[in-house]
Amino acid sequence: MPLSIFGFRALWSPYFLLSIVLLCVLYFLFTMKWRHRFVGSEPVTRKQISYFIASMIVLYIVKGSPVDLLGHILFSVHMAQMAILLLMSAPFLIIGIPNWMWRKVLDISILNWIIRLFTKPVISLLVFALMFSMYHHPFVLDQVKLNIVLHAFFTITLFISALFLWWPIVNTLEGQPRLHGLKKIGYVILSAILITPACSLIIFVDVPVYETYSSGEAWLKAMALCVPASTLSGLSGLGISGPELFTNMPTLYDQQLGGILMKVIQEVIYVVVIGKIFIAWYRHERENADEITKRDLLERQKLTMHG
């Protein structure tokens, strides 16, 4: 069956889109029109604007477009959603918000304490790995997909843990937990290792473990999170009983593909990040080497002149 039977609201999440647009409007008001009202503010750069808009676009695509609806039907799409949300939208958001705005956030004592604690590299790695693994435990994910409050709580909490994960790598604030040079590469590699067990369990298990993707009754209840009740009741007469009506892929294969996609997307993103870190480190080391060479030459010239 085509996804269009669920209606425009379920497919395009207009209220969520309006929220994204509102966030963008507020971003431009604070960074441009109202910026002069804040002490210590600085002009926003094109790079920051690009990253913020990219973060919002990615956020809408994975949580507001038909991709989100499809993620309730196919576990593989859900896993791709989570990979892109946590590993792209989160770091883009950090980079896109100017440092002076982050300083205003950190001026709030409790937030400053929380961010300083949970963005310490060891803690941020463990918190993200724990949240990711717990979220994708069969019992937890099934409960989350059946309760809108739990779903919102876990999604927001997992996204915040992703912000903590990326903070030591991409933030440029003085005095904040921050990694330098090749330590960033080790941090990224360790992050990949820590979430591998959760992905491996999904890939190598030989039976479907998520009721909300395999049981027709549980699946219909889960669909209520993204499809209006009036639409679902109107579709009951069509004999919709489960995700198998929208895909020919066996549930087990879909589940295993989900684990593979999560790992592949993560590896691709991490390889790009490691490449950028290495290039930046190499350039920094070369510039330092050139500077040392220049100083040595000047010292020799001085010694020669005095001699």
Image (cartoon, grey):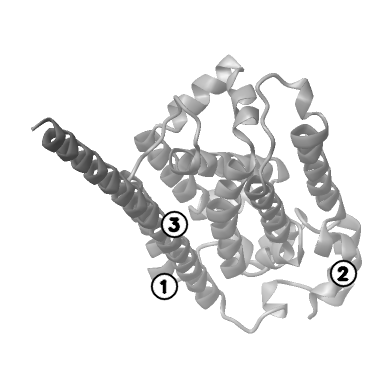
Spatial distance from mark 1 to mark 2, Cα to Cα? 32 Å
Say which residue label 2 marks: 235
Q: Is residue 264 left or right of residue 62?
A: left
Q: Position of residue 196 (x, y in %)?
A: 37, 58
What mark, if any, has residue 273 been given in the picture? 3
Residue 236 in view (yes/no):
no
Q: Secondary structure at mark 2?
A: helix
- CA separation, marks 3 and 2? 45 Å
Residue 251 occupies quadrant: bottom right
- Dot 1 falls on a residue whose secondary structure is loop
Disc with the residue nearer the chain's start (3 vs 2): 2
Q: Amino acid at mark 2?
A: Leu
- Specify the amino acid type for callout 1: Asp
Q: Residue at x 76, y 62 (%)?
A: 65
3 or 2: mark nearer the eye: 3
Q: Residue at x 57, y 15 (%)?
A: 109
Amino acid at the residue labelled 3: Val
Which quarter of the figure has residue 14? bottom right
Residue 83, position as x, y percentages in the image:
54, 59
What residue do we see at 37% from left, 39% from top? 179
Q: Which residue is found at the position 73% from the left and 56% from the top? A: 60
The first of marks 1 and 2 along the sequence is 1
Q: CA distance from mark 3 to mark 1?
A: 33 Å
- Picture coordinates of residue 126 (x, y %)? 38, 40
Q: Do the residues under discs 1 and 2 have CB atoms within 8 angstroms?
A: no
Seen from the viewer's position, the closer of residues 75 and 220 is 75
Residue that protrudes farthest toward the bottom in the picture? 248
Give the crowd class for mark 2: few <14, some 14-19, many >=20 residues within 10 Å. few
Residue 12 image position (x, y, % from top left): 82, 61
Numbered badge on residue 206: 1
**Is disc 3 placed on a helix, strand or loop?**
helix
